[in-house]
């Protein structure tokens, strides 16, 4: 989970948001603030709602193209709960909320997959097997 989440304002242009996403190396930015999550802007939002329609990323704002239906998980939720929600809704990212509903992070499908893989011991067994060490 990424805890140092950068938020973008809904009035920001898509061009500015895309630059921020590139600089940060992320595929999505939550819109609003930690206390007021208004939506999420994803690379797919930009691709399908701006680029594919031939709109100008210098004039279209984040608020015009962001995803406003927000699915999230709580920090105390299990990996299985988060994965089930992501699978059911075809999501690659979920905002993580604390007990007060404040956004405290963003978890990705890659984060969860990596955690499950490490927890399963598959990686450790594969490394041991490749190195000839007992598993």
Image (spheres, rainbow, N blue to C red):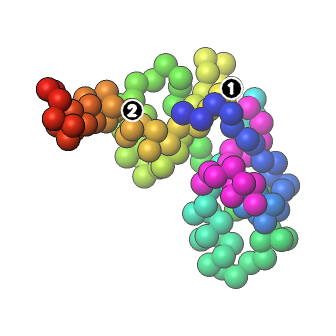
Q: Which corner quadrant holds the C terminus?
A: top left
User: Which of label 2 and label 1 is nearer to you?
Assistant: 2
Alpha-carbon span between mark 2 and mark 1: 24 Å
Quadrant where the image shows the N terminus: top right
Q: Quadrant of residue 52?
A: bottom right
Q: How many marks?
A: 2
Which quadrant of the structure image shows residue 42? bottom right
The stretch in magenta equals 19-34
| Left or right of 43 on screen, residue 38 | right
Q: Residues within 10 Å of mark 1 (few under 14, many from 20)?
A: some
Viewer-proximal residue among 121 and 82: 121
Q: Which mark is residue 102?
A: 1
Tag of residue 115: 2
Task: Choose the circle earlier in sequence order: 2 or 1.
Answer: 1
Q: Is residue 31 magenta?
A: yes
Please, what secondary structure does the residue beneath circle 2 have? helix
Q: Position of residue 28 (x, y in %)?
A: 63, 51
Above or below residue 29? Residue 17 is below
Residue at image coords 60%, 54%: 27
Crowding at mark 2 (Cα within 10 Å: few <14, some 14-19, many 20+): few
Residue drawn 60% across the image and 27% down it: 97
Is residue 24 visible to the viewer in this orientation of the structure?
yes
Q: Relative to 131, is 58 above or below?
A: below
């Amino acid at each position: 989970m990424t805890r140092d989440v950068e938020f973008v304002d809904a009035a920001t242009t898509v061009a500015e948001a895309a630059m921020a996403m590139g600089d940060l190396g992320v595929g999505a930015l939550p819109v609003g603030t930690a206390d007021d999550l208004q939506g999420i802007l994803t690379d797919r939002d930009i691709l399908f709602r701006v680029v594919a329609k031939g709109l100008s990323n210098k004039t279209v704002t984040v608020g015009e193209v962001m995803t406003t239906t927000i699915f999230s998980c709580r920090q105390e939720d299990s990996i299985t709960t988060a994965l089930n929600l992501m699978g059911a809704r075809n999501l690659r990212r979920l905002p993580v909320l604390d007990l007060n509903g404040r956004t405290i992070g963003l978890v990705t499908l890659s984060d969860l997959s990596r955690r499950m893989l490490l927890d399963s011991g598959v990686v450790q067994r594969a490394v041991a097997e490749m190195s000839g060490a007992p598993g």
